[in-house]
Image: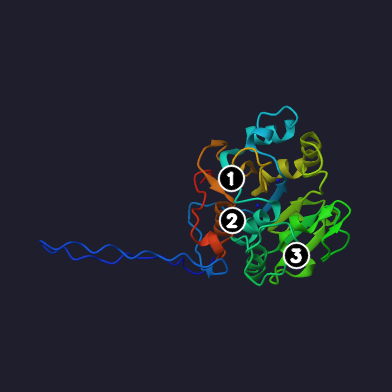
Amino acid sequence: MLRAAALLTVVPLAVSALAGCAAAPPPTATPPAPSTVVAATPPPALPSFAHIVIVVEENRSYADIIGNPKAPYLNSLAAQGVSFTNSYAETHPSQPNYLALFSGSIQGVRSDACPHTFSAPSLGGELLAAGRTFVGYSEDLPAVGFTGCTEGKYARKHNPWVNFTDVPASANQPLTALPSDWADLPDLSFVIPNLDHDMHDGSIAQGDSWLRDHLDGYAQWAASHDSLLMVTWDEDDYSAANQIPTILVGANLRSGQYDERIDHFRVLRTIDDLFGLPYAGAAATATPITDIWVG
């Protein structure tokens, strides 16, 4: 597949220029704890988006997708938009990567065990607290606000917002609730295909076709409506040092391949800045992505 208080900064101590005296080293800043929220002001270079849709796919490396003839649609998106050639997940297995992208922390989770409940701040909760709108759409979710661990090809481990107390049950929606009029989308949404269509159980070709069938209309609409589609992966298939594809298409982009190293924390930091949100967890110390935007 899309303002706030001033950013706190650490100011180094001024050092007197006294002849013959050695300068004292500046103090080392202590990174905030994973649940810390730091107020932010979006950098002026970042554009404004009406809608951002994030699709998270499963368990494929960069080399599995980019250049693979079995993924023609994804490669067409990479060619027309922004493709990161040095994008990495945080860890294995799946669930902690979703938590990292959504909250700036793996929240101490190192497995796909279910269920979990976290009171830490999250991207969805911060959007809602700022008066923005957020919805997560999961394919095969059986009902709005469903909290079960599995149902058919739906898996809660791929749905991070259900775990956070700052996101109401009403934001946990089935894919069937995705608006047919793209202008009715929330400010930011996640789209999570089921286990067959996210490439976890199904093939690359199957996932590629599903994405085209469900979101190509949005990808084409976004370019002329100040909106953005991001497609990324939770992790690789344990074959490539956790290098994953991350692709952006839509408005306000400088198309091309970018070889800077990014990860889920940098992506979260960038989304926070685009919406002028406070930073949760590691997003507070991550570097935003600023070189891909037009004006």
- From the top left corner, tell me how far across and down residue 205 is, in percent: 79, 34
Residue position marked by numbered label 2 in the rendering: 268
Q: How many labels does the image show?
A: 3
Q: Which of marks 1 and 2 is nearer the N terminus?
A: 1
Q: Is mark 2 on a helix, strand or loop?
A: helix
Q: Earlier in the sequence, mark 2 or mark 3?
A: 3
- From the top left corner, tell me how far across and down residue 63 is, in percent: 64, 33
Residue position marked by numbered label 3 in the rendering: 162
- Quarter of the image for residue 211 reads top right
Residue flagged by tag 2: what amino acid is it? Leu
Disc 1 from disc 2: Cα separation: 13 Å
In-front residue for pair 24/265 = 24
- From the top left corner, tell me how far across and down residue 13 is, in percent: 29, 67
Residue position marked by numbered label 1 in the rendering: 88
- Quarter of the image for residue 280 reads bottom right
Q: Which residue is drawn at 66% across and 61% down?
A: 109
